[in-house]
Image: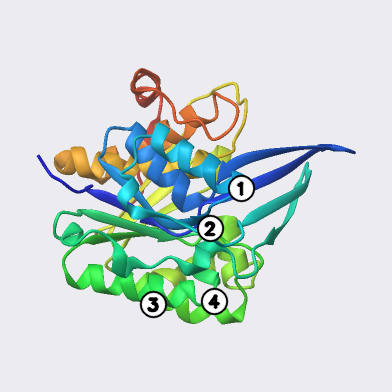
Amino acid sequence: MSSFPQFVSFGEALTDMIRLGADRWASIPGGAPWNVARVMACFGVPSAFGGAVSQDCFGAELWQASEAAKLDMRFMQRLPKSPLLAIVHETHPPKYFFVGDDSADLHFDANVLPQGWAHEAKWAHFGGISLARQPLAERLVSLAEHLKAKGVRISYDPNFRAAMDERYDPVLARMAAIADLIKVSEEDLCGLFRTQDEDAAFATLRAMNPAAAFLYTRGAEGASLYAEGHVWRAKPPVIQVVDTVGAGDCSLAGMLCNLMHHPEAGWGEHLRAAIASGAGACLAAGATPPAEATIKALLTQVQLEILA
């Protein structure tokens, strides 16, 4: 049995501070890279989150949620720094800003991770606002390049946020160049390339690494997968949506899990797994990973076609 996780997701774990009323707020553990790690563990892949959190109540909540998800806690660091907060002051549509000057996440140190862990890792994931926050971003991109050179497969989800302006362009180029799997949405493309021409933006992104597989998500319309010269499109099953929070992270985790557990299944089936997992996440409130039985039931309802 492996002594280290097969999957590690690097980046930010943060606290969503959600305004519920004039004087009511709720704190919810979050952060896209952290959530991907948590979902992967829920799906049965030995996983870890590589990042740093504060030592206060917010960090404690993230730590406890990570333990509950059965993540390998050797990869998570607690530091005497302030927390990273996402202040969601409106929810329909979402409006938010981040508070995290010199916060704990910026001080994550990959050099103190357990020795030898990279030899057993199969996939490493990067993305989120961590790659737009220096000096953390440079350290994470360098780590990704180092892992790629060692034969670890890399997944990348830019997950566009307003902080990803022109200064993010070099990070995008470097991460796209080494990624084996890139997940992107229409909103990501418009934001990253500062355009309303989604097709042109996607063509530009694909040109950065023609050998990569691209999971292009389109919300309720489903998703397309571009890999090895072929294109697949999948439409999600008809469901009663409760909450779309975390659906994208679950979708990516569903594909990565299928790639790791069933590498021989083929890209079409990997896409089907992604769509079923994302749809399953929409059946419950919050970023709640769907149960295995739910995913199996939804898999049969995913409409899959080959476009090229």
Q: Earlier in the sequence, mark 2 or mark 1?
A: 1
Residue sitting farthest toward the left: 1
Residue at (15, 46) in percent of width and height: 3
Real-space CA distance between mark 2 and mark 1, rounded to the nearest whole angstrom = 17 Å
- Image height of 214 relative to 19, above or below: below
**Callout 1 secondary element:** strand
Coordinates of residue 232 in the picture (x, y in percent): 35, 46
Real-space CA distance between mark 2 and mark 4, rounded to the nearest whole angstrom = 12 Å
Real-space CA distance between mark 2 and mark 3, rounded to the nearest whole angstrom = 16 Å
Q: Dots 3 and 4: beta carbons under 8 Å?
A: no
In the drawing, what numbered circle is on residue 168? Answer: 4
The residue identified by callout 3 is 174
Q: Earlier in the sequence, mark 1 or mark 3?
A: 1
Colour setup of the view: rainbow
Coordinates of residue 136 in the picture (x, y in percent): 47, 72
Q: Earlier in the sequence, mark 4 or mark 1?
A: 1
Neighbours of disc 3 within 10 Å: few (<14), some (14-19), many (20+): some
Real-space CA distance between mark 1 and mark 3, rounded to the nearest whole angstrom = 28 Å
Real-space CA distance between mark 4 and mark 1, rounded to the nearest whole angstrom = 23 Å
Q: Earlier in the sequence, mark 2 or mark 3?
A: 2
**Callout 2 secondary element:** loop
Judged by depth in the image, the label closer to the viewer, 1 or 3, is: 1
